Amino acid sequence: MTNTSHRIWKYGDNINTDVIFPGKYTYTISHDPVQLARHALEDLDPTFAARAQMGDVIVAGRNFGNGSSREQAVTCLKHAGLRAVIAHSFARIYYRNAINNGLLAIECPPLVDCVETGDTLAIDMAAHEIRAGERTFAFAPLPAEVRAILDAGGIIPYLLEQF
Amino acid sequence: MVSEIGSGEYAKLRSPCQQNGTQLMPTLTEQILARASGRKRVVPGEIVVIEPDVTLSHDNSAAIAEIFAQLPHKRVKFPERLAITLDHAVPPPTPKHAQNHAAIREFVRAQGIQRFYEVGRGICHQVLCEEGVVGPGMTLLGADSHSPHYGWLGAFSAGIGRSEVAALWATGQLWLRVPETLRINLRGSLRRGVTSKDLTLAMIGELGADGAAYMAVEFAGEGLANMTADARAALTNMMAEMGAKSACMPPDDITWRWLRDTLARTRPQDCAQRLDYFEANALYPLADAQVAREQTIDLSAVEPMVACPHAVDNSLPLSQVAGRRVDVGFIGTCTNGRLEDLAAAAELVSGRRLRARLLVIPASSLVLRDATEAGYITALLEAGAVIGTPGCGPCMGNHMGVLAPGEVCISSANRNFRGRMGEPTAEIYLANPAVVAASCVVGKLSHPADL
Ligand code: SF4
């Protein structure tokens, strides 16, 4: 895992849930992985859904995922194959939703300005480090409660483990 | 279960509770969370587990029920704590949306949910206040990002995701991180023609879309006394657009009068008991409560504001953008679809003809009824406006007024993100309802005083 290299999609600040997964689909597409992936980032980058590959990551600026509480804004990226979203900061409901659905969400402000779309990075979860090019960036470890949910694959698998 | 520790920035925030060894007073939010988690005291950054008094969901309830079905719990743990509204796509625009509603009704029946509000009753946040489901000192977690709304009643409320709601249905409890508090002191009063919506757009423009990220906003100061119930609800509602986890203010005479008057109409059978419960439950700010950040705003200095495409914090004084073309106006939503909002619009358009289309959707059936009795609906219809079924309408692009490519909309809603009203090439401006109405009269972004 440590040395797996992830292709980067780079976006700016305040990438909101409406451009990640448009509201017009929220009551007709809930859990279908193919449909979710097809509309990922539709109103931000219409080329993304067709070109995203398994293991890619998004690197973005401040307040990623602000706006709606819709969980599809997380699951559409997951089903599009994304390994992680790394941002300067996250909107709080998005952050919860990411953990709850087993999508790695990392706040790492210094990394954001050092990479571009098409670059690659590697994530070391044990050392809490991201390597991009020649540089290494540290990120804060997740609190134990949060890590347990993420490791279980989300809050529902986590609850299932309790029974 | 989940907490709210962000991994970076906010781990750096220090707890303000212990300074030089002296114990400082808890904020209103901390008092509510302490009681809800059964602790004497909670401090920012701490993780607590609460059993919220109310768990809210709406048209997303069928999708949540599908997640719930993956869990071994066959029954909802506390059915009496659930509140479910049908409001986001009402009446259903397609057979698929209708089927979604049908699945929710089936879940409601099977689980014996009493607090279920049908198509046409109105938007979740308005309805739950009107029905006395939430009151001072109570806690609500909702699968809706504008859940901070209930803080205008002195409650703690916050938005969560669908999976967490499923977990709450199953277990009745959820972990929360106690937020740092941003106190906003309001001084003086707003000038005529300036509303609490303008205040929020000015604040969000200044502090940014993440200006209160992860924080609890607490409004305080004598300026609150000059704000009506409707104006207050818009204030806490909009704090979601500043990244806040929750927003609240202390209950006062205006709060209690609104609750008394409203509950007497919506639940005459147990209005007195409910008010007694609220009074016993209410919590109030303590002097010397320590907050992480504090700001003071002179209300008389606020001017009419407009949020320009495609971000709420992209706000400018109306005077700087007046004259831009407008194709359609929308007055409604949980932010500005209440009686006072419809009154302002009706007053402006009465005796005039609209140059741009104007869609008006009351936030609830009660608002629609009051607006009808007051003659506002007639005034709006005579000017050429369209009235829709109480609910969210086109706010999130589902139906009933979505935009055409390239159209420009001026809206009293809370979000102007690209594609929000269904079409990515359309442009959305946000403003107070009187500015929306004035702009529709002229066909251009306009100040009511210019008519
Ligand atoms: S009116 Fe708009 S913002 Fe309010 S609950 Fe409905 S969709 Fe959400």
Image (cartoon, coloured by chain):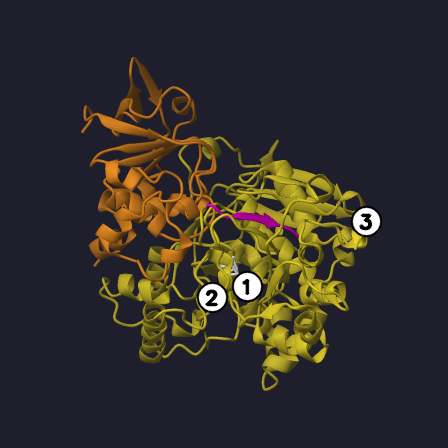
Chain colours: A orange, B yellow
- The kind of secondary structure element at disc 1 is loop
Q: Residues within 10 Å of mark 1 (few under 14, many from 20)?
A: many
Q: Answer whether residue B37 is visible to the viewer in this image.
A: no
Q: In the image, A114: left or right of B389?
A: left
Q: Amino acid at mark 2?
A: Val
Q: In the image, A87: left or right of B365?
A: left
Q: Is residue B85 above or below residue B373?
A: above
Label 3 vs label 1, nearer the camera: 3
Identify the image quadrant of residue B205.
Answer: top right
Task: Give residue B199's position: percent from left, percent from top.
Answer: 69, 48
The answer to if B426 sits in the magenta stretch is yes
The answer to if B224 sits in the magenta stretch is no
In contact (CB < 8 Å): disc 3 and disc 2 = no
Residue position marked by numbered label 2 in the rendering: B54
Q: Residue at x 64, y 66 (%)?
A: B338
Which chain is home to disc 3? B
Identify the image quadrant of residue A105.
Answer: top left
Q: Quadrant of the C terminus of chain B?
A: bottom right
**Region in magenta:** B425-431
Residue position marked by numbered label 1 in the rendering: B138
Which chain is home to disc 2? B
Whether labels 3 and 2 share one chain = yes
